[in-house]
């Protein structure tokens, strides 16, 4: 006998839930949603920065007396954890729901980062413990990327989706600023042996506050209806609508023509997903992979070698490097906030292609000035700030792209796949650029490296221009039909079925 769940999956469902979500005006509910979920990127930026800031302390007796190579491995283990977490929790998010996972992933991060602070000795066992806790923390943050991007895109009305997603992704750099200031104060205000441990508690303190807010958020009604959970979906969308009505707003009528008819799709694993992405949706898969790889390569190349550049070529004292980094981070943070609305008005294709190409051109100009010896530490920092004002908006739009151009049933897993691909390519960049910096005796090598980075970003911009999807202001179901949809009310040109590029 077939189970009740199997019966539900065999029966067509008619629904207006996507249209009901997209018609909503902005409300305090949406603000609360963005704050509660968007903290994922703040935490990641904070974690990466704290780990980098305390690296020198971990090499000393008041730290853990680790070798430079062992300290470097701490960051590597964290990044590997992010990839594993994205793939593992991304699969569970599509299977079990967004809300379940954005509670679990934050809890995993809290445990991992909190335990890092309890690394009490420098013996082999304690070093293994340190690596394990960094891997766990990375898994939590990697899972956040998959679950949170999916939830935000599915709960935010279509006309706000672009600017909100881009701004949220950009808050990574707010976390980096918090991490820089926090560790700078801790390492100077208390003994280093305590300061570095307290640094790893900055994120968990923030996370404990946010997890309480997340518990009051509803599940994605889109995910619920696509999985045959009609009653639960109705409860969730009614709750959201009531939250908006409490502000005194009158909700527009729902257009009955936007009714969708669907049969909940069966679970899709990663093997079938890869076949779907690269065989049935090659244009979109190429777009997503290119945008994610190119931005990851550039960011890892510059971000992880920035201090080396300043100390090797501009002879900046290592104690003053955080001051230059803060200026760099501010530019990255402001860019998505200022430019984000343009991705909803001017459009995705123009803005993504434009920000990638412009950042590539500016990087090439900066490379020429660097090779000519025309830059100082200050002017180099100003140049980076301007370049990444645009590059940060483009990079944030890469995450937006991979979260909105693939079917809902595989959205979290698709984000995880492209995140993992980007991280693998991005991990190569610091090795390449670290070697190009060397002892600073051959700046021409770094000049060539910067030109290579410029070309890579330009390639991303051109791919966005020719393969970009005009998703601005459109319902997710119009950008790409869910796999189970039988009768979508409308389709955007070229968005129709999963087989379209």
Image (cartoon, rainbow, N blue to C red):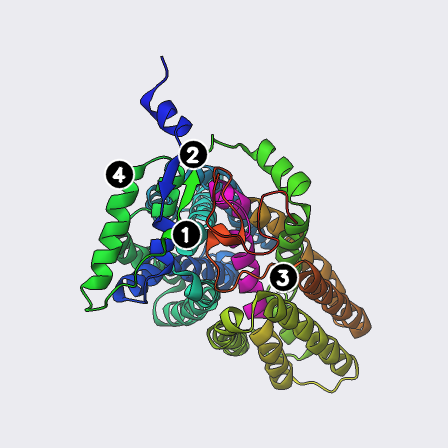
What residue is pinned by disc 3?
295
Q: Residue at x 32, y 67 (%)?
A: 26
Precedes in sequence: disc 1 or disc 2: 1
Q: CA distance from mark 1 to mark 4?
A: 20 Å
Name the residue that disc number 2 marks: 264
Dot placed on the residue nearer the N-terminal end, 4 or 2 = 4
Residue 131 seen in the current view: no
Residue range of the region highlighted in magenta in the rendering: 391-416
Indicate which label's residue lies in the foreground, 1 or 4: 1
Estimate the x, y position of residue 417 in percent, counting from the top left. Answer: 57, 44
Magenta stretch contains residue 307: no
Rounded to the nearest angstrom, the CA distance separating label 1 from label 2 is: 18 Å
Question: Is residue 22 depicted above or below 109 in this figure?
Answer: below
Q: Of residues 139 and 149, which is closer to you in this image?
A: 149
Query: To which quarter of the image does residue 3 belong?
Result: top left
Name the foreground residue: 449 vs 292.
292
Q: Residue furthest top?
A: 1
Q: Is residue 415 magenta?
A: yes
- Find disc 4 in the rendering and name its residue: 231
User: Whole-percent x and y of residue 112?
Assistant: 39, 46
Label 4: few (<14), some or many (≥20) within 10 Å? few
Distance (Cα) linking label 3 and label 2: 35 Å
Task: Find numbered disc 4 in the image and state the secondary structure of the residue it sits on.
Answer: helix
Q: Are marks 3 and 1 in contact (CB under 8 Å)?
A: no
How far separated are the C-alphas under marks 3 and 1?
A: 36 Å
Identify the residue under disc 1. 258
């Amino acid at each position: 006998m077939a189970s009740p769940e199997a019966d539900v999956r065999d029966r067509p469902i008619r629904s207006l839930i996507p249209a009901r979500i997209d018609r909503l005006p902005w409300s305090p509910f949406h603000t609360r949603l963005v704050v509660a979920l968007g903290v994922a990127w703040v935490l990641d930026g904070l974690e990466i920065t704290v780990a980098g800031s305390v690296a020198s302390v971990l090499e000393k007796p008041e730290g853990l007396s680790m070798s430079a190579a062992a300290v470097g491995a701490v960051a590597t283990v964290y990044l590997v954890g992010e990839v594993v977490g994205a793939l593992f929790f991304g699969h569970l998010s599509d299977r079990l729901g967004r809300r379940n996972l954005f509670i679990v992933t934050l809890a995993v991060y809290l445990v991992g980062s909190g335990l890092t602070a309890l690394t009490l000795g420098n013996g082999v066992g304690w070093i293994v413990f340190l690596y394990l806790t960094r891997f766990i923390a990375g898994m939590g943050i990697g899972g956040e990327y998959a679950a949170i991007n999916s939830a935000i895109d599915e709960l935010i009305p279509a006309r706000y989706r672009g600017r909100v997603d881009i701004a949220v992704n950009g808050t990574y750099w707010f976390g980096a600023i918090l991490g820089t200031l926090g560790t700078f104060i801790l390492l100077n205000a208390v003994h280093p042996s305590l300061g570095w441990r307290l640094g790893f508690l900055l994120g968990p303190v923030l996370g404990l506050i946010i997890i309480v807010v997340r518990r009051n958020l509803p599940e994605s009604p889109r995910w619920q209806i696509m999985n045959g959970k009609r009653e639960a979906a109705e409860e969730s969308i009614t709750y959201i609508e009531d939250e908006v009505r409490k502000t005194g707003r009158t909700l527009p009528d729902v257009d009955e023509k936007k009714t969708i008819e669907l049969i909940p799709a069966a679970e899709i694993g990663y093997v079938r997903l890869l076949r779907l992405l690269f065989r049935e949706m090659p244009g979109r898969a190429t777009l997503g992979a290119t945008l994610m790889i190119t931005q990851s390569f550039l960011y890892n190349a510059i971000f992880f070698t920035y201090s080396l550049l300043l100390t090797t070529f501009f002879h900046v004292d290592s104690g003053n490097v955080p001051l230059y980094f803060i200026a760099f981070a501010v530019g990255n943070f402001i860019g998505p906030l200022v430019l984000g609305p343009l991705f909803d008005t001017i459009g995705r294709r123009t803005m993504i292609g434009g920000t990638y190409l412009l950042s590539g051109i500016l990087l090439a100009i900066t490379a020429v000035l660097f090779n000519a010896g025309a830059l100082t530490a200050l002017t180099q920092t100003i140049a980076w700030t301007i370049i990444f004002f645009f590059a940060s908006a483009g990079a944030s739009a890469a995450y937006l792209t991979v979260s909105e151009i693939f079917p809902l049933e595989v959205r979290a897993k698709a984000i995880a796949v492209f995140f993992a691909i980007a991280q693998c390519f991005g991990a190569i960049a610091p090795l390449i650029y670290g070697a190009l910096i060397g002892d600073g005796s051959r700046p021409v090598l770094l000049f060539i490296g910067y030109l290579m980075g410029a070309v890579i970003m330009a390639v991303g911009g051109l791919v966005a221009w020719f393969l970009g999807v005009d998703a601005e202001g459109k319902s997710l179901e119009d950008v790409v039909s869910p796999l189970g949809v039988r009768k979508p009310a409308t389709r955007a040109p070229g968005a129709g079925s999963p087989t379209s590029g």
